[in-house]
Image (cartoon, rainbow, N blue to C red):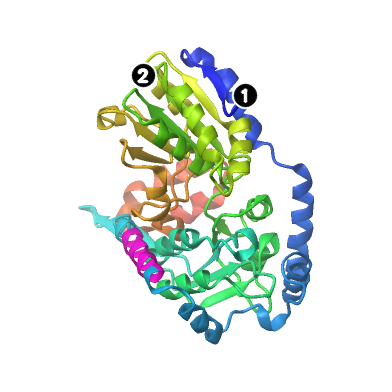
Amino acid sequence: MPCKDIEYSGQDSWADVKKWLDLRKNPDQKVDGIVREILNAVKSEGDQALIKYTQKFDCPGFNQDMLKVSADNRSVAYTEVKSEDLEIIEESIRNVKNFHRRQVQQSWWTTDNDGTILGQLVRPVDRVGLYVPGGQGGETPLISSMIMNAVPAQVAGVKQIAVISPPRKDGTLNPYILATAQELGINEIYASGSAWAIGALAYGTQTIKPCDVIAGPGNIFVATAKGQLVGEVGIDMIAGPSEIAILADDTADPIWIAADMLSQAEHDPLASSILITWDKTLGSKVKEELRTQAKKLPRGEIALQSLNSWGAIVEVPDRNTGINFVNNMAPEHLELAFEDPWGALGLIKHAGAIFMGHHTPEPIGDYFAGPNHVLPTVGTARFSSALSVETFCKKSSLIYTDQNYISRHGAKIARLARLEGLEAHARSIESRYK
């Protein structure tokens, strides 16, 4: 039977739910050592490590010439994509660009009456590496992942963007990946995958230049590699399994709710789909729909595994208790499937993305509307945000003072330095006014 049944009466009930959900966070500790070995190999061997691992796991006949995708291959791939599909990709890119343009921050400074100038300079990083998963041997290209990661970097003003994606058995990349890159104006594309691809973007190889920021989703090997490289490079986030929480009342359509839960459950067996409702009959109706609809899905078996392990129907006494559950969970995706969702919006404190009302299912955000679909998972929406233009920028403080400033404030600054035991700091100031 799909989904757990949970009765949630308020804050005192959260500890048991959290204990259950936290089980999704436990990574396979064996992966850490494997990934560390891979990264060390890439750091020391460069291209040869990429070729070795790619031959072993993706393409037995892979060679040096296949590592960088040529302009000819990109052009040929573009012709293999249907024109109507290209139009959809173009429109999605436009929507995502329009949204992210509103996130651009400007440099600024202020001038005080005494001539002191203080400010902040906002600049893009020089070079970004984007990882695009191949998906089922390269036959289900993650087009949306490339768009969602590339567009905010471009809007930020990043001049160099490199894309890397695991090759298919014949050493090529899916034409939809290459066509999307061309629509985005990205010409630097490499065929390599998993942790070794992440290592190449971080350390650089004979063919691939190192990057300042790495972004893009992937499996546990990709996520672990990004985690181990924090401090070496910037990363977007370490994403966990996908999740959706749906807060619904008696006006919600169980057919729609089940379809939305399955849209997350089909990702992988660790995905979590949770319905929270104060309607006494909605849960049973949704369960029946989940059984019916899952049978008709190509990835229905994966979806059922997900629902059986991490799906839940949470019964709450009222809407406010349901909101309390949501704020504790801090879900990646949150649907407010009830009348007047706007009236409840101010009470929602923690969620990666919020989908308002019955006619805003989560896939609208995944693919098309404009907001980024790279979102914090497994409760990290309590303190982190969606991928944005800011991910690909850095900020420098600007400070200007004159001799009058030092004369007025120098003794105070020197005193603070000496309180911390830093005599040279104090003398740096005093040398200018004594």
Mark 2 or mark 1, earlier in chain: 1
Instruction: Give me the disc on residue 320.
Output: 2
Quarter-of-image position of residue 134: bottom right
Q: Main secondary structure of the magenta part?
A: helix
- Quarter the C terminus occupies: bottom left
Q: Amino acid at mark 2?
A: Asn
Q: Position of residue 214 (x, y in %)?
A: 56, 61
Question: Which type of secondary structure does the marked residue at label 2 adopt?
Answer: helix
Q: Using residue 4 as the reference point, say whether residue 179 is left or right of it.
A: left
Q: Residues within 10 Å of mark 1 (few under 14, many from 20)?
A: few
Instruction: Give me the disc on residue 109.
Output: none
Quarter-of-image position of residue 395: bottom left
Q: Is residue 434 visible?
A: no
- Quarter the N terminus occupies: top right
Magenta span contains residue 86: yes
Q: Are marks 2 and 1 in contact (CB under 8 Å)?
A: no
Residue sitting at x 34%, y 55%:
370
On screen, 122 above or below 253? Answer: below
Q: Position of residue 281 (x, y in %)?
A: 42, 18
Instruction: Give me the disc on residue 19.
Output: 1
Q: What range of the chain is rendered magenta?
A: 85-97
Q: Position of residue 57 (x, y in %)?
A: 75, 64
Question: Closest to the observer: 147 or 305?
Answer: 305
Q: Amino acid at mark 1?
A: Lys
Question: Which type of secondary structure does the marked residue at label 1 adopt?
Answer: helix
Residue sitting at x 57%, y 27%:
3
Residue sitting at x 57%, y 19%:
15
The CA span between labels 2 and 1 is 22 Å
Q: Is residue 184 visible?
A: yes
Question: Closest to the observer: 89 or 259?
Answer: 259
Q: Position of residue 24 (x, y in %)?
A: 63, 35
